[in-house]
Image: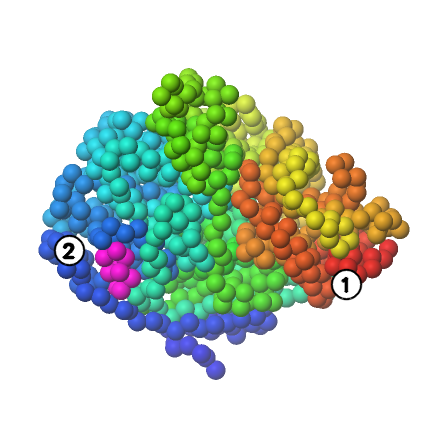
């Protein structure tokens, strides 16, 4: 019996659910009913011209959350709007900003978006509303693509300046004297996609905002801050951490929503002993093809750049075999040129494109219209990201389908066996640490360049004098007779700070296939080691390119188009050295601790894998320099006396297996992305002289995950033991301690025995 009303989309879904190959994989199928709108009248303070402009766009009244947020901003209160995708958050801040400019043409607003594409979308939307209202407002994008002649016009006459945190940090704040008209009259600061400002990026942006508000104070302005976010667990707290100010939280949406089908699929076991499952790629491809061939716009999310290219290749080939429009399916990820990405976004909006395979690059609110179906290949790593990606499908009045196909990994398998974890739990709390010493020092330097510091001035929660005294010892600042701290170096500090990663540069990929070389794309420095090392096969828009030369010093990779039946996958060799212990305490089976560590990673070898089967065809060596990361880690140092009877090889297997289980449970326990934590196992740690398991953070300085794991040690170890003990495999699999053949011996029994020792039970050889 069908649980849903017939429609072209649900007919396709019905046929899929009648397919035995799909039906046996379904572990959850929920139907979320449509919800009607909740309206509020247009605000009484709204200019009649703006009301007419809204009416011309078919808007006679607002949804309730839009009215509440707009009224609060008009009353000069900071606001954070956290409502679902496509709920019209833009109007919440566009209306009070447009009203401010209508009241006083000298008024200014600054819009911050994490990506250029989002900024360009917003400029178009704002100009459209202003034009419909008969208001001539100078709204422009100021980013790295803005031509030099236009930049001076924006600085002097821009009423609404749309930019990103990187440009604000490096091009606007250090040159604030050229922007005095903006800072003197700044009434609103808009921070969109608030949930993206987490981890090291969020910590940097919080300090950029401290610098911004410090400059506003200097020019006598006191802007109201409007934040908007996808659904997260702590929007008000995140806004306070980011801006240093309390904000009114608006999280009850009045927008309508269509009926939504949400499915969680787990590919069936094909080898119960080893825990091997059917391919999640093949199952996701089968589902996506059904919707694409029926003419329904579909987005497929892959977990990595390589997975996106492999999925795109498979879908295009299948569409061609079925005489379908293979060229109407495109890829979308970091590394594509901006012109390519804009063309893909436009094609999705207009319907010219039928489907897209994307990394989380399309998770953000770039305007691509409302699609019919979204297919997630693997758990995205967080509840918030899962809902964002699923929310990419669905028009306000129509039916939509969202499908999560679990992979073989431990976290994916946890989600597959506990679908309520994703569908019912509150989304994660975004974490950042603006007072991380590495980050704080960098921005105190940048702020001292912008304006001198009087004694006792706070930068964050504490006075900056101690930090400035340290910088004075380094020769960056000097203290004058009046006690004020002045910049004293010839360096330009903002240029030395990368907001988004520890790597400040990208590697440009140059295609030399034709007589005239062309830029194919780019990749960040860390990823370049595994994606564009010499002899790598680089995938771009389902085409293969052989990397003939990587000029590491010049940051250029030279590639040539090839047609081969394989791709490459590189391995990183990771070593870890403890630098300082922040805290330690006795624990069952040993000692727990957390502190500062140095993690070194070296791209060592690469494997050649067959495109269709993943079969290993050979390997080669990579010759690139090692990269170091100073961060924080949580660790468990084992009591050697408890494991004196263990053979070294068995202890090695047990440590790796238990470490994988701890790593999987940690990401669930902290509700963080699995990639936020790395795992290193040392049979005899050079520092501790005993077996040690480390879980280290993946960003410079860390963002507070390590101390939280230290505090929840017992919960973490017991959870890992439950994961391993409850897994139905015989001797280890990807869902618990790792694949049996990779880990060696009886990895499951050994890993379980070690974890039992860590919860206080007897360890046996």
Of residues 407 and 129, the one drawn nearer to the viewer in this rendering: 129
Q: Which residues are magenta?
A: 63-72
Of residues 622 and 175, the one drawn nearer to the viewer in this rendering: 175
Q: Which mark is residue 605?
A: none
- Give the residue at the far front of this rendering: 482
Of residues 391 and 650, the one drawn nearer to the viewer in this rendering: 650
- Give the residue at the far right of this rendering: 645
Q: Residue at x 38, y 18 (%)?
A: 481
Q: Secondary structure at mark 2?
A: loop
Of residues 530 and 683, the one drawn nearer to the viewer in this rendering: 683
Q: Which mark is residue 730?
A: 1
Q: Considering the image in quadrants, where does the C terminus appear?
A: bottom right
x%, y% of residue 650? 83, 50
Q: Main secondary structure of the magenta part?
A: helix
Which residue is labeled 2 in the image? 46
Q: Secondary structure at mark 1?
A: loop
x%, y% of residue 151? 26, 30
Instruction: Give the image quarter of residue 633.
Output: top right
Is residue 651 rendered to the left or right of residue 234?
Answer: right
Q: Residue at x 29, y 44 (%)?
A: 189
Is residue 577 rendered to the left or right of residue 181?
Answer: right
């Amino acid at each position: 019996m069908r649980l849903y009303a017939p429609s072209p989309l649900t007919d396709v879904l019905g046929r899929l659910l009648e397919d035995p190959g799909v039906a046996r994989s379904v572990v959850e199928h929920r139907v979320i009913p449509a919800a009607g709108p909740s309206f509020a009248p247009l605000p009484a303070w709204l200019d009649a011209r703006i009301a007419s402009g809204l009416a011309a766009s078919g808007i006679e009244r607002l949804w309730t959350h839009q009215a509440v947020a707009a009224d609060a901003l008009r009353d000069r209160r900071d606001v954070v709007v956290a409502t679902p995708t496509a709920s019209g958050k833009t109007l919440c801040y566009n209306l009070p900003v447009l009203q401010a400019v209508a009241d006083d043409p000298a008024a200014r607003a600054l819009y911050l978006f994490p990506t250029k594409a989002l900024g360009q979308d917003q400029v178009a939307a704002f100009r459209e509303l202003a034009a419909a209202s008969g208001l001539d407002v100078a709204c422009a994008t100021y980013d790295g693509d803005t031509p030099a002649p236009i930049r001076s016009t924006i600085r002097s006459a821009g009423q609404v300046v749309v930019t990103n945190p990187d440009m604000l940090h490096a091009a606007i704040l250090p040159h604030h004297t050229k922007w005095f008209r903006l800072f003197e009259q700044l009434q609103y600061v808009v921070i969109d996609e608030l949930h993206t400002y987490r981890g090291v990026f969020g910590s940097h942006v919080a300090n950029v905002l401290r610098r911004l508000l410090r400059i506003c104070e200097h020019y006598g302005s006191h802007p109201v801050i409007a934040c908007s976010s996808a659904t997260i667990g702590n929007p008000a707290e995140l806004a306070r951490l980011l801006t240093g100010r309390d904000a009114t939280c608006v999280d009850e949406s009045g927008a309508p929503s269509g009926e939504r089908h949400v499915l969680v699929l787990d590919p069936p076991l094909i080898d119960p002993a080893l825990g091997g499952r059917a391919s999640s790629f093949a199952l996701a491809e089968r589902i996506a093809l059904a919707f694409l061939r029926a003419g329904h716009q579909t987005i497929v999310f892959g977990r990595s750049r390589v997975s996106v290219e492999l999925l795109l290749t498979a879908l295009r080939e299948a569409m061609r075999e079925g005489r379908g429009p293979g060229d109407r399916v495109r890829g979308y990820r970091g590394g594509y040129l901006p012109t390519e990405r804009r063309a893909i976004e436009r094609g999705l909006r207009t319907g010219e494109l039928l489907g897209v395979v994307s990394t989380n690059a399309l998770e953000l609110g770039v305007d691509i219209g409302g699609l019919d179906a979204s297919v997630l290949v693997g758990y995205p790593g967080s509840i918030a990201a899962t809902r964002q990606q699923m929310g990419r499908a669905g028009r306000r009045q129509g039916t939509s389908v969202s499908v999560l196909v679990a992979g073989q990994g431990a976290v994916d398998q946890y989600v597959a066996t506990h679908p309520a974890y994703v569908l019912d739990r509150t989304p994660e709390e975004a974490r950042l640490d603006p007072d991380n010493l590495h980050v704080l020092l960098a921005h105190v330097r940048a702020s001292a360049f912008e304006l001198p510091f009087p004694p006792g001035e706070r930068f964050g929660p504490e006075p900056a004098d101690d930090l400035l005294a340290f910088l004075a010892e380094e020769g960056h600042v000097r203290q004058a007779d009046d006690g004020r701290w002045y910049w004293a170096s010839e360096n330009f500090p903002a240029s030395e700070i990368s907001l988004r990663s520890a790597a400040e540069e990208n590697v440009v990929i140059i295609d030399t296939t034709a007589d005239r070389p062309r830029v194919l794309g780019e990749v960040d420095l860390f990823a370049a080691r595994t994606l564009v090392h010499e002899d790598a096969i680089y995938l771009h828009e389902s085409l293969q390119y052989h990397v003939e030369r990587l000029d590491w010093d010049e940051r250029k990779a030279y590639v040539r188009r090839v047609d081969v039946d394989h791709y490459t996958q590189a391995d990183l060799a990771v070593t870890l050295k403890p630098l300082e212990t922040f805290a330690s305490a006795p624990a069952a089976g040993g000692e727990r601790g957390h502190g500062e560590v140095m993690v070194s990673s070296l791209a060592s070898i690469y494997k050649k894998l067959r495109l269709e089967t993943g079969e290993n065809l050979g390997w080669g060596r990579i010759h690139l320099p090692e990269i170091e990361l100073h961060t924080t880690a949580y660790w468990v140092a084992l009591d050697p006396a408890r494991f004196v009877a263990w053979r070294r090889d068995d202890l090695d297997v047990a440590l790796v297996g238990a470490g994988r289980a701890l790593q999987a449970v940690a990401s669930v326990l902290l509700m963080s992305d699995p990639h936020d934590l790395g795992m290193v196992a040392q049979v005899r740690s050079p520092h501790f002289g005993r077996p040690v398991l480390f879980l280290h953070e993946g960003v410079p300085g860390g963002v507070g995950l390590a101390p939280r794991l230290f505090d929840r040690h017992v919960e973490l170890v017991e959870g890992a033991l439950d994961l391993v003990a409850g897994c139905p495999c015989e001797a280890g699999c990807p869902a618990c301690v790792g694949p049996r053949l990779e880990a060696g011996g009886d990895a499951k029994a050994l890993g379980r025995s070690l974890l039992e020792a860590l919860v206080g039970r007897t360890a046996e050889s």
